[in-house]
Image (spheres, grey):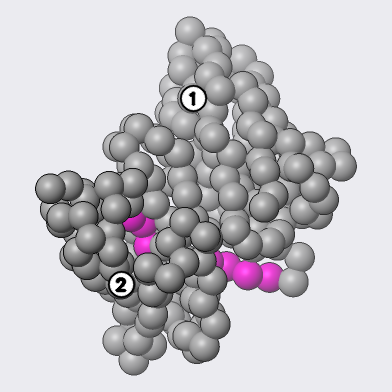
């Protein structure tokens, strides 16, 4: 099974700050990587697909990048509505595994 | 507007069965793979099952293989998850999700609100 190692597990940041979350895949998964945001008490929502493509309706302050088997989600200017838990997920091969999540809080 | 509405959750004893349903609307259901993803209380996300557009192909992780069965009725735009031999570790919120597969990537692009399943005596 492909392991997705996500870091950090938790993150405290200030409004307008730049935030970066990373996921390391245990093997090559190409661009079969997505990022999701889950706000408290809500369902997950798709943010990024194909490692770098922004999902419909997602603010442009969110971006995804890839360097080999390391993937990053960047929030360019943190807003209060960005608070929640973020997950990466690979769909290169079953089982489709998720990272453990990053809990993003306001400082 | 894409909508996915799950139903059928509840409290069930270990070893018993439960069937979840998901009613889809706002898109051509038969054109998309569909999936179930679960989340144990205060835990992360775990993929549970995926089904092809026609229903001829299904995929499961080892944790539920042989116990869970995903199915669909394209005429009713509905997705199902039959869960047998339930264990306490199956306690979770179960999400119905649309699985969008392309040539170079795949992702869960729409999610339902989730339905809680509690396995306990």
Given residues A99 and B108, the one toward you in this image is A99
| Residue at far bottom of view | B75
**Residue depicted at x 28% and y 59%:** B86
> In the rendered image of this protein, does residue A39 appear above or below residue A98?
above
Q: Residue B82, labelled with which disc?
A: 2
Given this view, does label 2 or label 1 mark the residue nearer the observer? 2
| Residue at far right of view | A68
**Residue depicted at x 43% and y 61%:** B64
Magenta highlight on residue B17:
no
Query: Does the image show residue A51?
Result: yes
The alpha-carbon separation of the residues under discs 2 and 1 comes to 32 Å
**Residue depicted at x 68% and y 61%:** A93
Q: Which residues are magenta?
A: B94-102
Q: Residue B22, labelled with which disc?
A: none
- Mark 1 Cα-neighbour bin, 10 Å: few <14, some 14–19, many ≥20: some
Q: Is residue A48 left or right of residue B62?
A: right
Q: Is residue A93 left or right of residue A10?
A: right
Quarter of the rendering containing residue B101 = bottom right
**Residue under numbered circle 1:** A103
Q: Position of residue B118 (x, y in %)?
A: 21, 49
Which chain does the residue under circle 2 lie in? B
Disc 1 is placed on an element classified as: strand
**Residue depicted at x 37% and y 62%:** B96
Given residues B5 and B70, the one toward you in this image is B70
Given residues A57 and A11, the one toward you in this image is A11
- Mark 2 Cα-neighbour bin, 10 Å: few <14, some 14–19, many ≥20: some
């Amino acid at each position: 099974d492909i392991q997705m190692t996500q870091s950090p597990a938790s993150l405290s940041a200030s409004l307008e700050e730049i935030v970066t979350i990373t996921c390391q895949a245990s093997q090559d998964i190409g661009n079969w990587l997505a990022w999701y945001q889950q706000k408290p008490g809500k369902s997950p929502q798709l943010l990024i697909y194909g490692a770098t493509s922004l999902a419909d309706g997602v603010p442009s302050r969110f971006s995804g990048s890839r360097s080999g088997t390391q993937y990053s989600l960047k929030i360019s200017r943190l807003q209060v509505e960005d608070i929640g838990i973020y997950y990466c997920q690979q769909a290169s091969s079953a089982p489709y595994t998720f990272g453990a999540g990053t809990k993003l809080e306001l400082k | 507007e894409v909508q996915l509405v799950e139903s059928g959750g509840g409290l069930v004893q270990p070893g018993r069965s439960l069937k979840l349903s998901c009613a889809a609307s706002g898109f051509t259901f038969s054109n998309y793979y569909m999936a179930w993803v679960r989340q144990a209380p205060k835990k992360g996300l775990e993929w549970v099952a995926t089904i092809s557009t026609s229903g001829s192909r299904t995929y499961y992780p080892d944790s539920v293989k042989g116990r869970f069965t995903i199915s669909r009725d394209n005429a009713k735009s509905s997705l199902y998850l039959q869960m047998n031999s339930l264990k306490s570790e199956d306690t979770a919120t179960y999400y119905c999700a649309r699985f969008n597969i392309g040539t170079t990537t795949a992702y869960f692009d729409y999610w339902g609100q989730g339905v809680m399943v509690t396995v306990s005596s």
